[in-house]
Amino acid sequence: EEQLVESGGGLVQPGESLRLSCAASGLSVSTNYMSWVRQAPGKGLEWVSVIYGGDSTYYADSVKGRFTISRHNSKNTFYLQMNSLRVEDTAVYYCARSEGGFRDWGQGTLVTVSS
Amino acid sequence: EIVLTQSPDFQSVTPKEKVTITCRASQSIGSSLHWYQQKPDQSPKLLIKYASQSFSGVPSRFSGSGSGTDFTLTINSLEAEDAATYYCHQSSTLPWGFGQGTKVEIK
């Protein structure tokens, strides 16, 4: 059974950094399109970033230059390094695996950016 | 960037009624359009992939149609457990994106 488990969320101040992890089981992060999707409190879903193929990456404009997606194939885990965090980055962050649609989702990890 | 616009934003429906949600893309995306259901405090769940393909385990009352720029999610004979917010998502062109969501309430 495929499973994704996020970790690393928490409370940080504006300008600080945080790294989220997504551990996969039952699927390989190295051969799939792996994404981060976030949801601000009471708001809709926002796609954030994807890693695929030979470490190709893409980002939403809202996080480009501040966030970095990466993966560790032997740990079957991928990451989201979030730098220069802003209040508007406050959200539940989900990791997800796509085959066209996002077929597998983690349970989400809450990131709160507040002074 | 492709923008997805859903309508309506909110719908209040009685059980057994038929629900139709539309998603319009700002440019043609072929059939690379997917639908999700999200209940409060839960992760989203894939319902329909590639416009009309039902995902494994999804009840048959959920169906999708459309191509190009106009897509529809239909829920036949709504059940109480279908109260949720529904989102469309395009995977045709990066950056990927979601519609703003349609909240379905049971009367």
Image: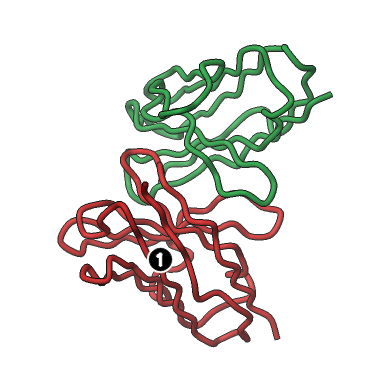
Work out which residue is located at the far front of the displayed protein and give it.
Answer: A1
Residue at image position (40%, 66%) is A22
Tell me what hue chain B is rendered in: green
Quarter of the figure with residue B6: top right
Q: Position of residue A83 (x, y in %)?
A: 46, 81
Tell me the subunit letter for badge 1. A
Q: Which chain is red?
A: A
Residue at image position (47%, 20%) is B64
Residue at image position (56%, 37%) is B87
Q: Secondary structure at mark 1?
A: strand
Quarter of the figure with residue A64: bottom left
Which residue position is annotated with label 1? A22
Q: Position of residue A19 (x, y in %)?
A: 44, 78
Does residue A115 appear left or right of residue A23 in this picture?
right
Work out which residue is located at the far right of the displayed protein and give it.
Answer: B107
Quarter of the figure with residue B69: top left
From this view, report whether residue B72 is shown above or below residue A69: above
Does residue B25 appear left or right of residue A99 in this picture?
right
Work out which residue is located at the far left of the displayed protein and give it.
Answer: A54
Q: Relative to the observer, which residue lies in front, B86 or A1?
A: A1
Residue at image position (54%, 79%) is A85
Q: Position of residue B71 (x, y in %)?
A: 48, 22
Query: How busy is the neighbourhood of tag 1: few (under 14 within 10 Å), some, or many (20 plus)?
Result: many
Q: Position of residue A84 (x, y in %)?
A: 50, 83
Q: Given the image, on which type of amino acid does mark 1 rest?
A: Cys
From this view, report whether residue B66 is shown above or below residue B41: above
Colouring style: by chain
